[in-house]
Amino acid sequence: MQVFHGLEELSEFGKPFGLALGVFDGVHIGHQAVIDAARGAGALGVLTFDPHPVQVLAPDRAPRRILSNLDHKGRILSKLGVDFMVVIQFSPEFAAREAREFANELFATGVRKLSAGDDWSFGRGREGNMSRLREWGRESGVEVHEVAAVMQDGIRISSTRIRKGLQEEDLDSVAAMLGRPYSVFGEVVRGRQLGRTIGFPTANVAVSDEVLPPNGVYVVKGNGIPGVANIGTRPTLDDHRGRSLEVHLFSDDLPMEYGWELEVGFVRKIRDEKKFGSLEELQKQIGRDVQAAKFG
């Protein structure tokens, strides 16, 4: 996927395109509706912000972790057929710009169609809204589409609801809101290499700022390959390195070298994490977990 850093770079794209606007944390089905509304004008792009605006404007209310970091977001968007992503660095200075000034810069890129959610606002004091953007777009010959919220059980789907669903271990509801199983994305790093000695080699995935589900053992897919994963503190090993994500995939032909990037999707939870009396007990339980994941 092509990535532009700012609207000036986008102005050099040179092809007709539509552009969906928003933060898109998690890229849930509400976000996907916004993206779909920008299709049909040539290439398809998404404009997003980094860091998350709430981390700048109201850090006391910002979530400790997000649902999708920038690299992961790009990976998800690419699967949805998005051709490029525009990343705008969000700062107090950017937030203080006049709404019309930002809108004019958008129109000057050559965009043919814009879309955003019905609650999207922008500019100093959030003075810009979809009504104004649509009015200004007409003046500039740009289609602007306001997309209504997508609901689940009569309640608006949001990144906040997804975080709550993860906390409550309601993976089915989370998957329904995302249109796919919830996943995290990270790099495979060196661990204690214990798994290979007990017959279950694992990839230790370094997840930086994305939300992990509660501790436990899960059925997962890693880059589409089935497997099991443990999230937790490895109490049997008296490991004091904090929470980790360890993934055992059901394949003998994997590039398990360090630095390999892995997207881990959580299908269902098998059990809570627990402390065993010995490595032999842990080994037997992992065997049962693998059987439950394969056949349960």
Image (cartoon, rainbow, N blue to C red):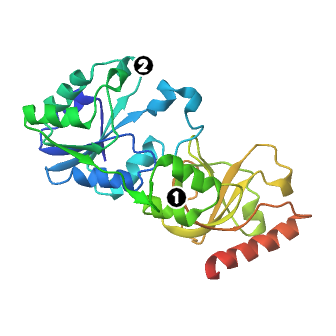
Q: Quadrant of residue 17?
A: top left
Q: Depth check: 61 or 239 in front?
A: 61
- Residue at image position (75%, 76%) is 288
* Earlier sequence position, callout 1 versus callout 2: 2
Residue 172 falls left or right of residue 15: right
Q: State how far apart marks 1 and 2 are (Cα).
A: 31 Å
Q: Depth check: 254 or 17 in front?
A: 17
- Give the numbered dot on residue 182: 1
Q: Is residue 103 above or below residue 296?
A: above
Q: Depth check: 56 or 253 in front?
A: 56
Point out residue 146 in the picture as x, y percentages from the top left corner: 24, 45
User: Circle 2 is placed at which residue position?
Assistant: 92
Q: Quadrant of residue 144?
A: top left
Residue 260 in sight here = no
Residue 121 falls left or right of residue 262: left
Amino acid at the residue labelled 2: Pro
Q: How many marks?
A: 2
Q: Are marks 1 and 2 in contact (CB under 8 Å)?
A: no
- Residue at image position (87%, 70%) is 281
Q: Is residue 29 above or below residue 5?
A: below
Q: Is residue 111 above or below residue 275?
A: above
- Give the numbered dot on residue 46: none
- Residue at image position (69%, 50%) is 244
Question: Which mark is in front, 1 or 2?
Answer: 2
